[in-house]
Amino acid sequence: VQTNWAKEDFEKEVAFLQKTADETGWPHAIVGYADMTVDDVRPQIDRLMKYKLLRGVRMQLHWHETPAFRFAASADQVIDPTVRKNVARLKDYGLSFDLQLFPAQMKDGLTLVGENPQTNFILTHAGMLTGMEPETTEAWKTGLHTLSAAPNVYAKLSGLGTFVHRNDPALIAYIVDNAIDILGPDHLMFGSNFPIEKLWTSHAELIKAHRAAVARHGAAAEDIFWITAERVYRPA
């Protein structure tokens, strides 16, 4: 979950989470915000690297034709030269990048990912399926197929209620089925997206729906609920 604080306060979130972990033992890994649009992101990352649980950085790059869904300045910000230059620097720190895109951006996303084979990219909300209209689901599956060409792309099964504003077991099962088919369970991980999902469901009901969807795929559960996240985020 990205807090979307003022950009100049990017370090405060990571500092708070590290302090919380030191005092309580939770969380076990941190993905912090860094502004990939500045000329050189390294001074920001240098400030974040002093927090021992930092494992990656994130910046929301998603853009959609529907204004309410968009966050990035433009659809092609993911391949902006400055963004590409800064993402390329992550390998020097051993950090991953949480990649938030809509399906129409995934071809450009593959360009960014392909330029950085040493960096793991984690696709937020399993590629953000916005609806169940045939053209929408086909575009989403096509986007996942595009990104599946890169072995360093993983996806989080998180925020699946974002566009329907409810915990929908049938929708979750549809996304899980297709994501497993396209990306494979060893490239998928569960994410609760709490507290956002708390707007329309409980943690218990959310977990129940995801477990039911994944249980239909046998041994996939071990990857999705444990192994993939352990491998990618290296929790302490």
Image (cartoon, rainbow, N blue to C red):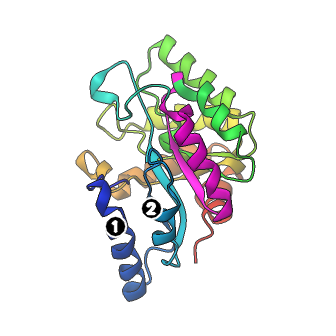
Circles 2, 1 touching at the beta carbon (< 8 Å): yes
Looking at the image, which residue is at 52% across and 34% down?
A: 78
Q: Position of residue 97 (x, y in %)?
A: 56, 52
Return the residue found at the far left: 199
**Quarter of the figure with residue 63:** top left
Residue at mark 2 to residue at mark 1: CA–CA distance: 7 Å
Range covered by the magenta-colored residues? 77-104
Does the magenta-highlighted stretch encompass residue 45?
A: no
Q: Amino acid at mark 2?
A: Gly
Q: Quadrant of the N terminus?
A: bottom left
Vertical side of 114 occupied by 103: above or below: above
Q: Helix, strand, or loop for circle 1?
A: helix
Determine which of the numbered discs, if any, sits on residue 13 in the image: 1
Residue visible at 34% across and 67% down in the picture: 13
Asked whether 89 falls inside the magenta stretch, the response is: yes
Vertical relation: 54 (above or below) 74: below
Identify which amino acid the numbered label 1 is placed on: Glu
Front residue of 231/56: it is 56
Residue 229 percent location from the top left of the image: 61, 60
* Front residue of this view, candidates 8 and 190: 8
Q: Quadrant of the C terminus?
A: bottom right
Query: In this rendering, would 234 be left or right of 35?
Result: right
Q: Is residue 105 visible?
A: yes
> Where is residue 198 drawn, in percent x and y?
27, 52
Left or right of 120 in this view: 78: left
Q: Residue at x 39, y 52 (%)?
A: 193
Q: Quadrant of residue 143?
A: top right
